[in-house]
Image (cartoon, helix red, strand yellow):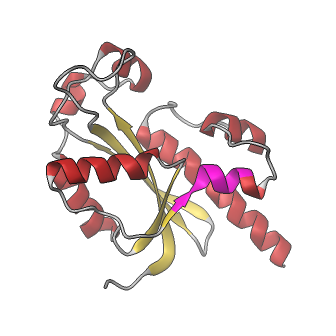
Amino acid sequence: MAKRLLDRILVVDVEATCWDTGVPEGQANDIIEIGLTVLDIAAGERADRIGLIVRPERSSVSAFCTELTTLTQTDVDAGIAFAEACALLRSAYRSHQRVWASWGDYDRDQFARQCDALGVPYPFGPRHLNVKTLYSLAHGLPRELGMAAALSHAGQPLEGTHHRGVDDAWNIAGLLGGLFAAVRRTDS
């Protein structure tokens, strides 16, 4: 078993092919962008703002998907293969050894489904933080908020384009970093 590293958290947000009327016959949701922000625990700061564009293998980008994410079929055709993206997460970011986080469970579930369907090794270890639930619990909220609503609640701006993985990962890391900073203030 790989040694767990607790120096950084990998904050991930994926965008996948999507449709406004359900998944068309013969297609499946494919990850088309992996947004990654590295949250340095000791410094409490965000580092590395990465957006990996991934070429879909089982679907194409719909007009609805482009409207939501700004990603076009041409953009993703120039991307890397999903297996290559997963291998890069492991080799460059040691994703199998680090805690990783996302807003909700969708990203974790999408990775698991797609890895299973394509026979690609899952790039992460077993430690996943659901920042959506954690944020709501930490603030005593009666329900979980969407990411944009949580940013508003925290008094933080939404940086970049909502529903772009690279920007959403950056914003989620800002919310998670704020939670860690609040804990450190109360521990002092």
Asked which quadrant contains residue 147, the reply is top right
The answer to whether residue 174 shows anywhere in this view is no
Q: Position of residue 52 (x, y in %)?
A: 30, 46
Q: Position of residue 144 (x, y in %)?
A: 68, 43
Asked which quadrant contains residue 153, the reply is top right
Count of labels in the image: 0
Name the magenta segment's main secondary structure: helix
Is the residue 88 above or below the residue 33 in the image?
A: below
Report whether 96 appears left or right of 4: left
- Name the residue located 42 percent from the left edge and 40 percent from the top edge: 165
Quarter of the image for the N terminus: give it: bottom left
Is the residue 29 above or below the residue 134 in the image?
A: above
Is the residue 113 above or below the residue 24 in the image?
A: below
- Name the residue located 75 percent from the left edge and 45 percent from the top edge: 154
Q: Nearer the viewer, residue 185 or 98?
A: 98
Quarter of the image for the C terminus: give it: bottom right
Q: Which residues are magenta?
A: 129-136
For this orientation, the residue located farthest to the front is 25
- Membership of 83 in magenta stretch: no
- Membership of 133 in magenta stretch: yes
Asked which quadrant contains residue 70, the reply is top left
Report whether 69 appears left or right of 148: left
Report whether 7 appears left or right of 146: left
Is the residue 127 above or below the residue 79 in the image?
A: below
Q: Nearer the viewer, residue 7 or 96?
A: 96
- Name the residue located 82 percent from the left edge and 78 percent from the top edge: 187
